[in-house]
Amino acid sequence: MPTAHLPPPEQALASYGDAHVVRLNALWKLSVQPGLSDAERIHAMLDMAADVLDMDLVMLGDFGENYTARYVSDRLGVLPEGTQMVVEAVLCHAVHLSREPSHIPDLREHPVYANHALVNQLGLRTYSGLPVTAGDDARWVLAFLRQRCDVPPLAVDIAYMGLIADWLGNTLHQAAQKRLLEQIALTDPLTGLPNRRAAEERLQMEVARFSRDGNGFALVLLDIDHFKMVNDRYGHAVGDEVLKVMAHRFEAGQREGDWVARWGGEEFLFVLHGSLADDAVGIMGRLLNQCRAEPVQTSIGGIPLSFSAGVAAFEPQDTDIEVVLERIDHVLYQAKANGRDQIRLAGQRGGKTPWNGSLLRQALADGRVRYAAQAIVDLQSGQVVADEALARIETPSGDIVEAKDFVELAEGLGLMAEIDRQVTRDVMRTCVARMESGGASGFAHFVNVSPQFLARHDLVEELLGNAMSFCQGCGVTLGPVKPIVLELTERQHVVSLDKLRADLQPFIDFGFRLALDDFGSGYSSYLYLANLPVSFLKIEGWLVQNMSKDRKVAGIVESLANFARKEGVLTVAEHVEDAETARILADMGVDYGQGWHFGRPQLV
């Protein structure tokens, strides 16, 4: 926001005469001088006024519960800045009440102020007070005092004082507006907590403080469990009520010096000073117990809630706050994936180093993305007719990390598209090698693709270009149907089915087929089936594993198989772990099976 400044002296001085051009020109230059903060400019302005008007004391004060001398130019050294006084005892009180200027040439002759301490003890004689209005804020008064007794101030001096008072009012108003805008920019409007931007700035200050004094702190990332269900069932207005109540609880549960911010959505970030990780777990545990015991009271009644949280301490060996944030983000994902309503401490994984964004990015940069192929078998013939590519990461030490340990993290960091890119490229390379060695052209390779990948038009074009190149170079004439099957999963959140269809269309046109993974696990998979040209349904593994124990589950699986057959869609049962399950599925009419009964995934 621009700094307030005076009009050019040629405009301001028309009626004052040339004798005062020099001092007003200096005042104007100070008002537009670059490189000064508002406080520095105000102090310089008061010092200049003291010199020009030969004043011993110039102060800008505000009237609140007490009077406070906020800015002071003091030749006598008698009034420290920030001094507070009882309102009624201040010389400026009458100016504050009347909002009219007051000029007293000799305070000793004034009926009210003759016995004032400033007169009797400090020998101040001349006083001028001017109201300063900063927008709608009328609590400021500018005061000029000196020990020398004088005739009433000249009109030109009064005009000079008024010019300074007006400038101060503009500056204070603009400073207040700037502070308000900064507060709005750094505050979550719903909960009143610091927002993510403010939290990121505070975290940098915490790291700097830690490097100075060595007093550690713990970080906690918390997510309200099943909050989406609250919004879906009761509406966003009730969801907002829940967020406000929970934010109040989180803030009320803090110790002095601790703070909490709304990190985004239903996530909150805590900084707990002087806490080891175990201490932080205890603090959050008490908060979780309160949350379990006290339903959130809303306009529709009480809603029982819990939360999941990831905890880590910022330790002496830590230098990058982003790495610690990724650690707690990772264990928060684990807490949510393992039933929610729990607190997890980063690093507690049987001695394993938890995955974080830095390690994942480095693996991508080093080309350590691999895939394992799991066989898909025709349940009638027992022949292997396809395989599925399952993403893996190879660590620098040669260990293989399974997808379940990094997929959610990759999706959260926007890295899933690059993983898909590397896996699909390697799958097509394997496909070509297989056909060149005499493999059947009808063998299908299933590969998962994320909405992040499909939305990247550069990666889509690259994949299609690779596919065309591989097809031309494999020496096998392929018809309109190509060996690659793209899998879509219920886990992925898709905003627009129309957009998803548009993103998939180039692959469909080229001859790739579509499969719905984990079919039956949620509502979205039925929307996909109704709106996309699907060739395969992969039946959710939980249904397959439980159909021998539950007649209803078996009925669901058989109904899916019958429905798919009528629609000309092939079914693939996942998590087939024994021969009896394979037999039952075959009797039901399920086409293909996949699981440990047919073979574990093998690294390619």
Image (cartoon, rainbow, N blue to C red):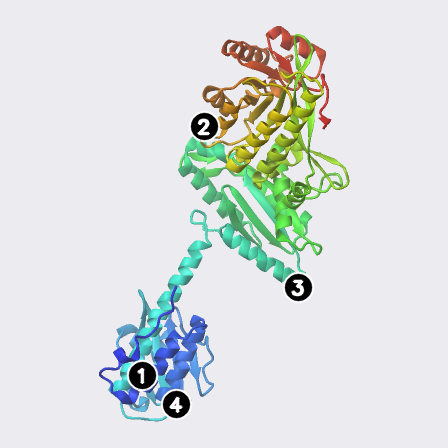
Q: In x, y percent, where is residue 242?
A: 46, 40
Name which residue type carries label 4.
Asn
Q: Is 85 left, or right, of 596 in this rendering?
A: left
Q: Find disc 3 in the rendering and name its residue.
A: 213
Q: Residue furthest right?
A: 397
Residue at the location (56% across, 34% down)?
Answer: 462
Residue 30: percent from left, percent from top:
39, 78
Tag 4 residue:
120
User: Alpha-carbon distance for marks 2 and 1?
Assistant: 73 Å
Q: Residues within 10 Å of mark 2 (few under 14, many from 20)?
A: some
Q: Are marks 2 and 1 in contact (CB under 8 Å)?
A: no
Helix, strand or loop at label 3? It is: helix
**Residue 349 visible to an observer of this rendering:** yes
Can you say which quadrant of the picture contains the N terminus?
A: bottom left
Provide the residue designation for mark 2. 497
Specify the amino acid type for callout 3. Asp
User: Pointer 3: residues within 10 angstroms few (<14), some, or many (20+)?
Assistant: few
Q: Which residue is mark 1?
A: 128
Mark 4 surroundings within 10 Å by alpha-carbon count, few (fewer than 14), some (14 through 19), many (20 or more): some
The disc labelled 2 sits on which kind of residue?
A: Leu
Sequence order check, earlier mark of 2 and 3:
3
